[in-house]
Image: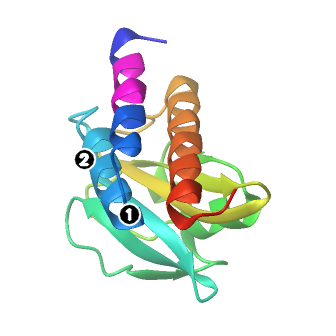
Amino acid sequence: MSKKRNQLIDNIRIAMANSHSEQEALKVAVELIDGFSEDYNWTGFYMMGDGALNVGPYIGPETEHTRIELNRGICGAAVTSKKTVMVDDVLSDPRFLACSLSTRSEIVVPLMDGNTCIGEIDIDSNQPSYFTDEDREMLEEIADIIVARLRKISGTK
């Protein structure tokens, strides 16, 4: 893993340790994650609530997709499968719900608390085939760090 990736993970760990609410933790995490690449054009969280995904803190163009049903979009697919979904060409994927007309690739990483998906990290890029297995591994590690902190903030486990 590159030095830049390791630095991001370390910064996330520090930021999570210093966050005292879910909203604060997600806001600082999205800022750090978005700062990792100039080729991210939408970086954000969707959190589970009332049986759907609800938009949380994000950086990027305003989205009309503030609530996503579990059977819709790439975000819904990631929650349903409880696995990371990487799409190299969103324009050829019928599940894609556009947040921006310039988006060409997307990665969605579930926030898994045991077997329960509590939300997800969603990142769009305007570059086709942008996300790699290294990105997936890095973001899955970040997701684990975030979930552990959210668990402590909420007082569970």
Instruction: Examine the rendered structure and indicate whether residue 95 appears above or below residue 20.
Output: below
| Distance Cα–Cα, label 1 vs label 2 | 16 Å
Counting residues from the start of the chain, the first of labels 1 and 2 encountered is 1
> What residue sits 28% from the left and 32% below the top?
36
Question: Which mark, residue 31?
Answer: 2
- Confirm whether residue 87 shows in the render: no
Amino acid type at circle 2 is Glu
Amino acid type at circle 1 is Ser
> What residue sits 29% from the left and 57% below the top?
27
- Confirm whether residue 131 shows in the render: yes
Instruction: Examine the rendered structure and indicate whether residue 40 appears above or below residue 2.
Output: below
Q: Secondary structure at mark 2?
A: helix
62 with respect to 52 (left or right): left
Question: Which mark, residue 49?
Answer: none
Q: Which residues are magenta?
A: 5-11
Q: Secondary structure at mark 1?
A: loop
Q: Residues within 10 Å of mark 2 (few under 14, many from 20)?
A: some
156 with respect to 28 (left or right): right
Q: Position of residue 57 (x, y in %)?
A: 31, 65
Query: Which residue ends up furthest to the right in the rendered image?
Result: 115
Q: Position of residue 50 (x, y in %)?
A: 59, 89
> What residue sits 59% from the left and 57% below the top?
151
The residue that mark 1 highlights is 21
The verdict on residue 15 being magenta is no
52 with respect to 123 (left or right): right
